[in-house]
Image (spheres, rainbow, N blue to C red):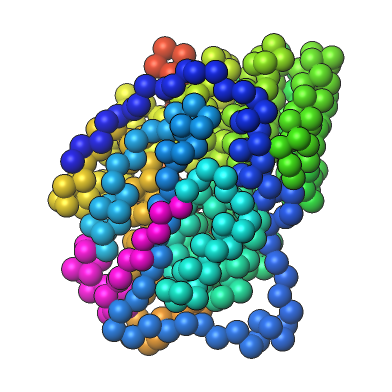
C-alpha cells in the first residue's frame, strides 16, 4: 500500500477553550516533573526480566481519530502502523532475532483523545504486568507518571514521543529510559539558540520566552537558554511560566502572557518544553490578534502546526531533529536519504508498506529506530536479556548507531539519547513547509 502524502487540513473553527482542555491532558506532564528518585535499597533490589526463546516487545500505536473529529484538527496519514511493526519484526527475526530470540510484537492501540494519568498507568500495567514485555516502544506518552511506571517495573523504554528529557531524568530512570531518535533536551536548547542566530531570526526583534512552570524548565532557561542568548547579545524582555495542571489555568496563563507580550511589543517568541504548547499558543494568539514569530523545533511538532495553524507560522524558524516529523521538503532532502532512513524504507517496501512522502513515514522511522537499536545492542549477545546488558550493548555502538529518523546520531558512555545533531529550519509560506537553512549543528552532550 502507498500512503497519501498529506491530508487536506480541516479548517473548521476550533474553540480555544476546547483545545486547551484537551491540551491540558497532554501538558499535565510538565506540572509534575519528569522523573523519579529511587532509594539505593530499591535500586539494589531490582532485577531485570529475562526472556528465553522469544522476547516480547510492546508497541504503542496512536489513534488520533477521536481527537481529530472532536477538535477539527488535522493529522498526517501515517499508514498502517500494525503492518509496519509486523514487517519490522519479521525482518529482525530473519536476521537472527534479538540476542538469538524471536521478537514477538505486542501491539496496543492507544486513544490520544482524553489522555490522562490513569489511562497511561493502565497502559503501563497492561504491558508490564499482563503481557510482561521486556521492552516497550512509546508513542504519544506525555503524562509525568508514564516513564517512572515502566522503570519501576524494570521495563526498557524505547521512547519515540517528542517528550523533552534532560540528562538527570535519564540517569534517575537508568538503565530503562532511552530515546534513540532525539537528543538530550538541555544540550539541544543551547544549540537551538545558535541555530536561530544563524537564520538571523533574532535580528530587529523583541524576544520573550514562554514555558510550562516546572523546576526543569526554569532550570533549563536559567542554565542554558538565557546564557546562550546573552552570548549573542539577546535578552528576553519577558519570561512567562504557565500552570498547565488544568484547562482553566492553561488558558488563563496563555491569555495573561499575550496581554503582557503585547504591552511590551514582543514579536519573537521562544517556547520551552515542547508538548505542542507552541501550537496551542498559536491558537490563543490568533484569537487575541497577536502575531509573533515563533521559534519552533521537533518537540513543537512543526508538521502539526503547519497543518492546523499555517497562518501563525509566518516568520517561524528553529531547529529540526527529525525531517520526517518537521515537514522538510524533498527539494532540500531527497526521500529517502542516508543509510538509516533508506534501510528502513526499503525494509518496509519489501513488505508492501510504501510512503508517498517523508511526512507519511514519520511514525514508521521511529519504529525502525527502536527495533534496530534492540537488535544491534544484543548483536552477538548469548546471555540473558537484561536492561543492563542492553545498556552495555547500546553504549558499545558509539558512532555505529545510525538512526533512520534524524540527521546525525551516535551513542557513548553515559548517553541515553541517540541523536547528536540538528539543522536550522525556517517556514516557507510558498510550500507551507520547513526549509533547511544550513548544515548539521552538533548537540552538546551533557
Magenta highlight range: 90-110
Q: Residue 79: where, in percent of width, then height?
A: 30, 42
Q: Residue 124: where, in percent of width, then height?
A: 53, 65
Q: Quadrant of the N terminus?
A: top left
- Which quadrant of the figure has residue 227? top right
Residue 98 inside the magenta-drawn segment: yes
**In the image, residue 371 above or below residue 225:** below
Residue 186 inside the magenta-drawn segment: no
Q: Residue 284: where, in percent of width, then height?
A: 67, 22
Q: Residue 342: where, in percent of width, then height?
A: 26, 46
User: What residue sits 40% from the left and 86% below the top?
Assistant: 384
**In the image, residue 11 above or below residue 47:** above
User: What residue sits 81% from the left and 19% below the top?
Assistant: 259
Kindly tell me whether residue 319 is visible in this rendering.
no
User: What residue sits 67% from the left and 68% below the top?
Assistant: 172
Query: Which residue is nearer to you in this view: 209 or 12?
Result: 12
Q: Is residue 379 left or right of residue 239?
A: left
Q: Is residue 262 left or right of residue 25?
A: right
Q: Is residue 279 left or right of residue 82?
A: right
User: What residue sits 56% from the left and 58% below the top?
Assistant: 120
Query: Which residue is nearer to you in this view: 260 or 132?
Result: 132
- Which quadrant of the figure has residue 211? top right
Amino acid at each position: 500500500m502507498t500512503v497519501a502524502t498529506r491530508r487536506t487540513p480541516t479548517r473548521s473553527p476550533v474553540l480555544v477553550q476546547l483545545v486547551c482542555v484537551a491540551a491540558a491532558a497532554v501538558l499535565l506532564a510538565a506540572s509534575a516533573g519528569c522523573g523519579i528518585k529511587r532509594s539505593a535499597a530499591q535500586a539494589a533490589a531490582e532485577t531485570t526480566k529475562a526472556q528465553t526463546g522469544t522476547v516480547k516487545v510492546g508497541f504503542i500505536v496512536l489513534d488520533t481519530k477521536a481527537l481529530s473529529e472532536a477538535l477539527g484538527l488535522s493529522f498526517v496519514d501515517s499508514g498502517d502502523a500494525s503492518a509496519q511493526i509486523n514487517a519490522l519484526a519479521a525482518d529482525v527475526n530473519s536476521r537472527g532475532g534479538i540476542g538469538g530470540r524471536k521478537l514477538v510484537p505486542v501491539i496496543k492501540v492507544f486513544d490520544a483523545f482524553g489522555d490522562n494519568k490513569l489511562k497511561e498507568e493502565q497502559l503501563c500495567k497492561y504491558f508490564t504486568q499482563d503481557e510482561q514485555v521486556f521492552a516497550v516502544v512509546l508513542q504519544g506518552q506525555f503524562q509525568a507518571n508514564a516513564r517512572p511506571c515502566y522503570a519501576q517495573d524494570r521495563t526498557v523504554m524505547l521512547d519515540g514521543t517528542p517528550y523533552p528529557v534532560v540528562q538527570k531524568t535519564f540517569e534517575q530512570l537508568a538503565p530503562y529510559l532511552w530515546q534513540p531518535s532525539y537528543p538530550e533536551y538541555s544540550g539541544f536548547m543551547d544549540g537551538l539558540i545558535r541555530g536561530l542566530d544563524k537564520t538571523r531570526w533574532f535580528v530587529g526583534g523583541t524576544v520573550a520566552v514562554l514555558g510550562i512552570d516546572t523546576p526543569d524548565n526554569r532550570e533549563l532557561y536559567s542554565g542554558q537558554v538565557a546564557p546562550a542568548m546573552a552570548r549573542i547579545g539577546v535578552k528576553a524582555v519577558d519570561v512567562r511560566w504557565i500552570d498547565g495542571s488544568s484547562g482553566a489555568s492553561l488558558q488563563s496563563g496563555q491569555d495573561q502572557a499575550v496581554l503582557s507580550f503585547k504591552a511590551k511589543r514582543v514579536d519573537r517568541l521562544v517556547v520551552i518544553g515542547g508538548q505542542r504548547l507552541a501550537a496551542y499558543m498559536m491558537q490563543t494568539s490568533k484569537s487575541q490578534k497577536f502575531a509573533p514569530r515563533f521559534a519552533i523545533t521537533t518537540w513543537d511538532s512543526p508538521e502539526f502546526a503547519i497543518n492546523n495553524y499555517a497562518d501563525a507560522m509566518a516568520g517561524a524558524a528553529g531547529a529540526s531533529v527529525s525531517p520526517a516529523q518537521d515537514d522538510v521538503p524533498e527539494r532540500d532532502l531527497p526521500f529517502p536519504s542516508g543509510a538509516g532512513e533508506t534501510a528502513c524504507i526499503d525494509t518496509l517496501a519489501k513488505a508492501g508498506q510504501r510512503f508517498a512522502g517523508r511526512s507519511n513515514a514519520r511514525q514508521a522511522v521511529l519504529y525502525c529506530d527502536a527495533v534496530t537499536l534492540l537488535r544491534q545492542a544484543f548483536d552477538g549477545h548469548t546471555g540473558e536479556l537484561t536492561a543492563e546488558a542492553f545498556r552495555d550493548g547500546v553504549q558499545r555502538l558509539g558512532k555505529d548507531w545510525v538512526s533512520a529518523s534524524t540527521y546525525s546520531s551516535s551513542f557513548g558512555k553515559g548517553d541515553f539519547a541517540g541523536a547528536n545533531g540538528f539543522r536550522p529550519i525556517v517556514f516557507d509560506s510558498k510550500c507551507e513547509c520547513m526549509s533547511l537553512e544550513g548544515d548539521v549543528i552538533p548537540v552538546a552532550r551533557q
